[in-house]
Image (spheres, rainbow, N blue to C red):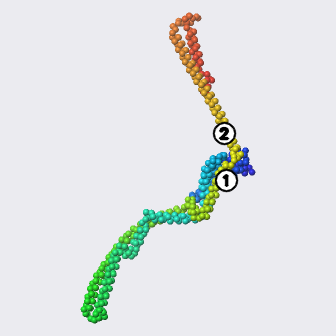
Amino acid sequence: MARRRRMGNGLAVLAGARPDVLEVAPGARAKFVALGGVLLSTGGLAVLSAAFAVHMALGVWWPLAVLIGLGWGVVIVNLDRMLLVGMAHDGSVKRNLLMAVPRVGLALVLGIVISTPLTLQIFHKEIDTEIVALQAEASDAYKKSLDADARFAGLPELREKVAEGQAVVASGGISAAELTPLQLQVTVAQVAYDAALTTQRELSAKAQCELDGTCGTGDAGTGEAYAQARRAADAQVDVVASMKADLDAAVAAVATGASRSVQQASADLETDRAELTRLTEQQTTLQAAFDATNSDNTGILIRLKALSALSHGDATMAAAHYLLALLFISIELLPVLMKMLLNFGPRSTYDRLTDLRDDGDLEIEQLQQSARVEVEQAQQELLVMAEKERVDRQKEQVLARRRARLAAAVAQRAEASLPAEPADAAEGPGRKPWDTGPIFDLARNAASRTVRTIRRRPDERVAERV
């Protein structure tokens, strides 16, 4: 029972209650104990949230993450306690609202910060699946950016050039683009040769037909018709020979060009292959490095992106996400909302006693301050009086020294003005009427008394030291 009471007192103090007032107004204890329990609940959520956040963002070892979470929980409890303690009861609704609005805003921010890691942890399976898709999209986007990069902009043309060179080498140079006009000439020459050869065969066949009498005039033998047909056939033989020479020249030109193209293609192919290999390896290295970093990107930022993507793509997921976040935010807002609602109600006995204690403490402090002021004034007056007495004594001493100097001066002038008297007269029992001895005696006595008066007494020296 005593242990439970001590725990309750601790919770009440955590909620901002004053133990001295609770002893007089025990009815308010339950309210503050409940507020303290709510503060501990928000602190517990903050501990879990920070532990999950640190583990997700930094991959920290779980025991260390829990220790960091405990530190964050203490900070959150302290902030919530500050919000509660700062909201004193006020009869004005307007002032209560003005005090509550910034505190509710701060509590809302804290609630969002605390609820986010917890929400991510609850939906971690769905988020892990979405992260894989996001990583694939990021890899494809990076590959496209590499293809568009100025360093690798010539790779497609370089690949085509290497393929063409390989084709030229494989074909013996026949497939080279610069041989296309020569090949066209070969084709034309081949067509002309074929046509001339066909004509020559037709003419030879016609001449033979005239000789046999199977066509033409129908008269067999070497007549005029046969002779003409033979001359035409023999003339076409020269034409065929000319077309054959042109065809052979075109074929020779193609062969020469093909040999030259093979040599040029072989030389260019080595350079192009080396450049293609270098650029391809560089692009592959960059892509591999990005893929390695991308696959390790499982921190809190990409999880937030995955959760946002899931919420936009699925209405059920969005509803569950927002309701869960609202639950955690409401728990964080609960202490401030409860304190605000209590302030809107009538003043309780605890509030009145608190005001009385505060007013009493203020009055006592004012009385003590007034007493301290009066004592200080009296001490200052005593110091002023003592200083005045010391100054007066110094004035008296100065005046005494001045009178002593004047008396000494008078005595010296009197001695100087008297004539020297005989020795026997000075030793005589009687004095003459003009004898000035008593005057000198009076001057000496006055000087001695003056010197004695300027000496400080012991009590005066003590007073000056004080």
Q: Residue 275: give x, y in percent of width and height.
A: 41, 66
Identify which residue, 317 or 57, lies in the foreground. 317
Residue 116 figure quarter = bottom right
Instruction: Please tell me whether mark 2 sits on a helix, a strand or a loop.
Output: helix
Q: Residue 424: give x, y in percent of width and height.
A: 55, 5
Instruction: Check contact, mark 2 vs mark 1: CB within 8 A.
Output: no
Q: Is residue 65 visible?
A: no
Mark number displayed over residue 5: none
* Position of residue 465 in the picture relative to residue 227 (left or right): right
* Few, some or many residues within 10 Å of mark 1 (<14, 14–19, 20+): many
Foreground tag (2 vs 1): 2
Which residue is depicted at the point 40% across and 74% down? Answer: 167
Quarter holding the C terminus is top right
Label 1 sits on residue: 38
Q: Residue 352: give x, y in percent of width and height.
A: 70, 44
* Few, some or many residues within 10 Å of mark 2 (<14, 14–19, 20+): few
State the CA–CA distance, disc 2 to disc 1: 33 Å
Q: Residue 185: give x, y in percent of width and height.
A: 33, 77
Mark number displayed over residue 362: 2
Q: The disc labelled 2 sits on which kind of residue? A: Leu
Instruction: Please tell me whether mark 1 sits on a helix, a strand or a loop.
Output: helix
Identify which residue, 24 or 292, lies in the foreground. 24
